[in-house]
Image: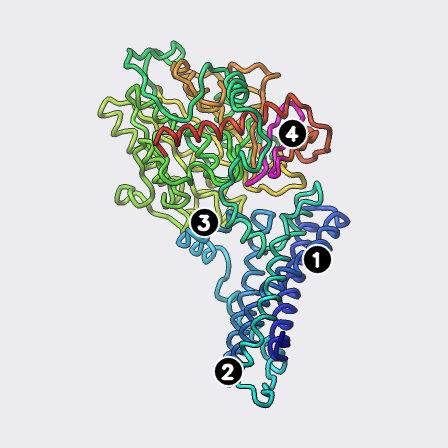
Amino acid sequence: MAFLSLAGWRSAGLSAGLALAVFVLTRLALLAHAALVSGQPLATLAAGFALGVLRDLPVAAVLALPWLWFASWFTGPRGQRLRLPLLFIYVFVLLFVAVAEGIFWDEFGVRFNFIALDYLVFTTEVIGNIRESYPVGPIVAALIGASLLIVGGCRRVLQVPQPQPAGVQPGGRRWRQLPALLVISLFALLAYWKVPPAEFSGNGFANELADNGWRSFIWAARQNRLDYRQFYATRPDTEVMRDLQRLSGHATVSATHAPVQKAAYHAPQALGGKQPNLVVVMMESFSAEYMATFGNREGLTPNLDRLAGEGLLFSRLYAAGTRTVRGLEALSAALPPLPGKSVVRWPNVSNLNTLGASLAEHGWQPHFLYGGYGAFDNMNSYFAAQGYRVTDRTGFQDGIVEFENIWGVADEHLFDQVLLEIDRDHAAGKPFFGHIMTASNHVPFTYPEGRIDIPSPGKRRGGVKYADYAVGRFIEMAKQKPWFDNTVFLFVADHCASSAGKTKIPVDRYHIPAVLYAPKWIKPARVDTLSSQIDLVPTLLALLGLGKEDHFVGRDILRMAPDEGRALLSTYQNLGYLKGNLMTVLQPRRKIETFRVSDDGREAQPVPTDPKLADEAIAYFQGAALLMEQHGQDGRR
């Protein structure tokens, strides 16, 4: 086997060394952020840092392979001329990804994952969002300057003479190196392939710090949709479905909508015997911790706090996941969160058992209205396939929108469009049902001037306070409408603003507000039963007198005994079942762990797993997977 050229070894060593240096500096920056901003213990983070450096080695080796092949194969003058430009591109990409990782960590507290993968698909919103949130020009200019300096310092390493052995033609030398190149490449790829996801600690920040952003991104690309049966603990299907029906309180549960027999509709007496309008407002990234109702003292949410006092407050309700699509899934189909992509992102899913489909059977016209571009996260396609009338920012009435950013129109303009839609249905004698998705409480946090006392852009505090302002304005305008007294409003978040925490599933990062408001019919009250986002659909159906047609997995919160309360929470891969203060977590490789959660939801201590709770957790998540399998077998997916 012929030895590789000196140029090949030097190029590979240089590229691997540069990658390792960037990886280490990136990890140092993330460690500092986790320690100083997130308050994580340095000793725990240091272990993650050390493990991460070891995990960087196979990634750097794989990144060096193209250089090894190029420098060994192209040994002539043309190869020499290309090396410096290619090195510049390589260094620039390394630095660019490092900066991107820092931005991603600041927002999500994790290395690149499936969210980063999704963001590459929706370039309009993401690139525009970055341009409006960060000084892109100066950052890119600085990266170009740094890349030029690094390449200038390394140019001598690449300038290696290429002596040819006597009697050996250049092409012949290349082919003699081929076996060595293949063997080295095989070993590097095998070493990389054997690097599993980082799970060495109970501290989520430390686990993420031990990972490598390049590796985690590729892993996310491979695992964007996970098969429950293949990766998670299972039980016999018949037992699972029996338990799921018991846990949901229904004789049958279904993921497929089956039309009901037409019958006279009788609204409950509490709503005056009329078909009320139903307006579900899902608020972007609105953590419960922002509200004075839950202890905040910054005065950010006076309008929602007032509605919470005048309406029905669900004080212990938890989001199903950490992304908007999880909230949309929960508030439409009431499905437990499956691992991988949300059902909203699945292609060609139609005729799901949704809140909109159930109401449409009785004369409501389901609407989905979004302040951004509904192509993002497949929102428009998903809701249209379920029979909703879809309106995103491209379909607003001319003249309504006076302020917008790359992420969406100002919430006040979204609510102006909602008022128009309700007016139209009211004029036609139809009850209105709208699922509304706001957009203003999201980076770049810009909004119309003069609305609140925090100048735009106001970062998170400004985004929260403006979103609250828009809600207050919406309600005051709705009060002037003839249909207001016959309208039920639900204000609920899609997820919390941050999902980062010390535990596998940080419970405090899932606590969201949920308020039912209908002053003519719903008396002020506070419900402290532990509940899930998926329970809101059955609760609304019961409130509207349609409880008998409820075949959803969730439960009517108002009929749950306090000791029956539970919440279903998820990350991309971990599936959590919270009951009492015990969190049972189902993980890939059929692993099950249980944690005792502190009262504030911030701490969790490992404890032995309760078999009964493990069975219930499996029933919910495996049951949801079975329901979607059955839905697909019906030819509707």
For marks 4 and 2, give the one nearer the viewer: 2
For marks 2 and 3, give the one nearer the viewer: 2
Whole-number angstrom distance, CA of label 1 to CA of label 2? 34 Å
Residue drawn 59% across the image and 67% down it: 64
Instruction: Name the amino acid type tagged 3.
Output: Thr
| Position of residue 605 measured from the top left corner of the image (x, y, whole percent) | 73, 33
Disc number placed over residue 54 in the picture, else none: 1
Residue drawn 60% across the image and 48% down it: 110
Left or right: residue 227 versus residue 585 is: left
Q: Earlier in the sequence, mark 4 or mark 1?
A: 1
Instruction: Name the amino acid type tagged 1.
Output: Leu
Task: Give the residues in magenta.
Answer: 572-590
Left or right: residue 111 versus residue 454 is: right
Q: Residue 630 is drawn in which quadrant? A: top left
Instruction: Name the amino acid type tagged 4.
Output: Met
Disc number placed over residue 446 in the picture, else none: 3
Instruction: Name the amino acid type tagged 2.
Output: Arg
Identify whether 369 is placed above or below 132.
above
Disc number placed over residue 610 in the picture, else none: none
| Mark 2 crowdedness (10 Å alpha carbons): few <14, some 14-19, many ≥20 | few
Q: Which residue is mark 4?
A: 583
Q: Earlier in the sequence, mark 1 or mark 2?
A: 1
Using the image as rendered, state which of residue 71 and residue 552 is in the foreground: 71
Q: Which residue is mark 2?
A: 81
| Position of residue 308 measured from the top left corner of the image (x, y, whole percent) | 51, 25
Q: Are marks 1 and 2 in contact (CB under 8 Å)?
A: no
Whole-number angstrom distance, CA of label 4 to CA of label 2? 59 Å
Q: Quick check: can you spot residue 399? A: yes
